[in-house]
Image (cartoon, rainbow, N blue to C red):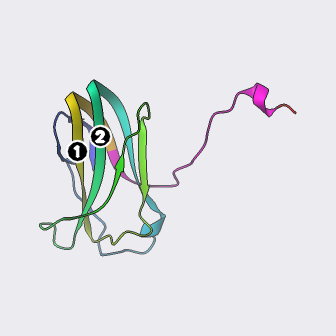
């Protein structure tokens, strides 16, 4: 939906994703994922809202996720959301002179892992 999109104010993703049909087979395995390449401003904040539509003209917000301080990734599962055929993102920015560069879209297989120092694995 967004490929290295520069965000300077609240706005929408550069692209709308067409899933081909409402609630397609396997949609529950998708994750809405965003990677923040850069961030600046005074106390900047970023909320990513997923909006969906049956006709690609009237969109409704069905979920959101807010970036936590110092995180570079944001993700939201779709399994319980009333997703329709067309989907876009609304990025809501806060703070003073916020600026972000974001890549976002639907993915499968997001892994939840945490780096662990070798010394913590020893018994």
Determine the CA span between mark 2 and mark 1.
Answer: 6 Å
Residue at coordinates 21% horizontally, 36% vertically from top-left? 7
Could you tell me if the residues under marks 2 and 1 are in contact, i.e. CB atoms within 8 Å? yes
Which residue is under mark 1?
A: 92
* Residue farthest along the left direction in this orientation: 57
Q: Which quadrant of the rendered structure holds the C terminus?
A: top right
User: Circle 1: is it few (<14), some (14-19), or many (20+) Cα within 10 Å?
Assistant: some
Find the magenta span and give its range: 104-121
17 or 100: which is nearer to us? Answer: 100
Residue at coordinates 57% horizontally, 47% vertically from top-left? 112
Compared with 1, 122 (above or below) is above
Q: Position of residue 57 (x, y in %)?
A: 11, 66
User: Circle 2: is it few (<14), some (14-19), or many (20+) Cα within 10 Å?
Assistant: many
11 or 25: which is nearer to us? Answer: 11
Q: Secondary structure at mark 2?
A: strand
Q: Position of residue 67 (x, y in %)?
A: 37, 41
Compared with 23, 115 (above or below) is above
Q: Is residue 103 left or right of residue 8?
A: right
Compared with 99, 64 (above or below) is below
Residue at coordinates 22% horizontally, 44% vertically from top-left? 92
50 or 14: which is nearer to us? Answer: 50
Say which mark, if any, is on residue 46: 2
Earlier along the polypeptide chain: callout 2 or callout 1? 2
């Amino acid at each position: 939906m967004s490929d290295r999109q520069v965000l300077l104010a609240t706005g929408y993703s550069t692209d709308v994703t067409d899933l081909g049909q409402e609630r397609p087979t396997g949609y529950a395995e998708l994750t809405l994922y965003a990677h923040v390449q850069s961030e600046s401003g005074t106390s900047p904040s970023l909320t990513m809202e997923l909006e969906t539509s049956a006709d690609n003209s009237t969109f409704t917000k069905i979920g959101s996720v807010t970036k936590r301080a110092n995180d570079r990734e944001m993700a939201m599962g779709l399994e319980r959301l009333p997703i329709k055929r067309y989907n876009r993102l609304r990025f809501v920015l806060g703070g003073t002179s916020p600026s972000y560069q974001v890549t976002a879209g639907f993915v499968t297989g997001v892994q939840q892992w945490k780096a662990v120092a070798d010394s913590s694995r020893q018994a």
